[in-house]
Image: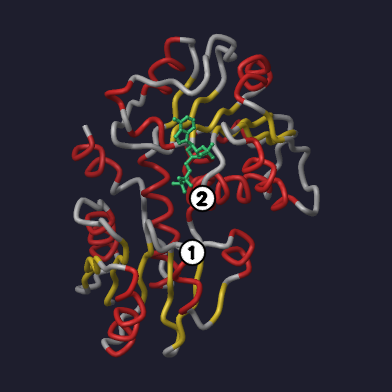
Amino acid sequence: MKLGLIGQPIKHSLSPLIHQQFLLQVNDVGSYQLYETNKEELPNILESLKEDKVNGFNVTVPYKEDILHYLDALDPYAEQIGAVNTVLNQDGNWIGYNTDGIGYVTAIKSQFPQLFTGDKRVLILGAGGAARGIYYAICQERFQKVDIANRTIDKAKGILALNHQHIVKSSAISFKEAEEKLGNYDLVIQTTSVGMKPETNEQIISLKNLKPNAVASDIVYQPLYTQFLTEAKQQGAYVHLGHTMLLYQAKVAFELWSGQEVSAEKVLPKLEEILK
Ligand code: ATR
């Protein structure tokens, strides 16, 4: 298969490593190339990928929304989220998917299946693109409540619209309210970009009230142990590391392209070796 990644910057992406491993698992001698591009060049790149009969590609920052203009069809899930991270070449047509949220849910379910029992409460910190995908996927699961806290509360309210069928109870709350109610949640998911800047030592909310046996999950994986996870661990919580979302969204994407099942667990040690 001919596969690749479109975005900017992508030089340090770990996706090539992951997809090379998946290609090996299915005995495919194909490749996963990096297509770093600016916004003006995006339509030309897509044209050349089609001419090259590329089977599929991933899309990352900053093009997950821009790419929607150039696709022939959208999977309903990607349509709901309004962003695409995976494109499949189906008989010369580009079909857009979003595997981020499903990847996140698959990753956390494999480590903490007990969270998915129907009576648990979830808090998502942050209301950017990543939170949107995760919220939508989480709402399809059995949870008693899924709240979103964000610095800009209107952005959190905007995400609640994804739960239009009111599958779960859900509210948009401030960080102050989140701090006060923290003891109510069994899973707290950190999706803001704050954890990416370890040098600032910034913590978006105090974790003083975190339940001792709660699960703290961060989608940031560089560093692997963010300030959020370190503090959560000190409070006695279990931790779920961000690189597993990266790995499982890749697994779901690869399975769409290849039609074959691959093992994420087999790739995990290699990924952890690099991120250590
Ligand atoms: P992505 O699409 O990767 O999720 P994003 O759309 O830039 O990234 O969203 C970043 C998130 O981090 C937002 O929730 C943002 O809060 P605002 O919506 O209020 O901007 C949050 N964020 C970034 N820097 C922050 C900071 N210093 N304190 C609190 N939240 C922050």
Q: What residue is shown at x 45% (from left), y 81% (from top)?
A: 94
Q: Residues within 10 Å of mark 2 (few under 14, many from 20)?
A: some
Residue 155's place in the image compared with 216, above or below, is below
Name the quadrant containing residue 228: top left
Task: Evaluate if marks 1 and 2 touch, with contact meaning CB atoms under 8 Å apart.
Answer: yes
Q: Position of residue 145 (x, y in %)?
A: 73, 34
Q: Secondary structure at mark 2?
A: helix
Residue 86's place in the image compared with 225, above or below, is below
Q: Nearer the viewer, residue 63 or 1?
A: 63
Q: Position of residue 70 (x, y in %)?
A: 46, 79
Q: Nearer the viewer, residue 206 or 99?
A: 206
Q: Position of residue 57 (x, y in %)?
A: 35, 70
Measure the alpha-carbon separation of dots 1 and 2.
Answer: 9 Å
Amino acid marked by disc 1? Glu
Q: Is mark 1 within 8 Å of ligand 1?
A: no
Mark drawn on residue 129: 2
Q: Nearer the viewer, residue 184 or 62?
A: 62
- All told, the count of numbered labels is 2
Q: Which of the image's four quarters has the C terminus?
A: top left
Precedes in sequence: disc 1 or disc 2: 1
Q: Is mark 2 within 8 Å of ligand 1?
A: yes
Q: Secondary structure at mark 1?
A: loop
Mark drawn on residue 65: 1
Q: What residue is shown at x 51% (from left), y 67% (from top)?
A: 97
Amino acid marked by disc 2? Gly
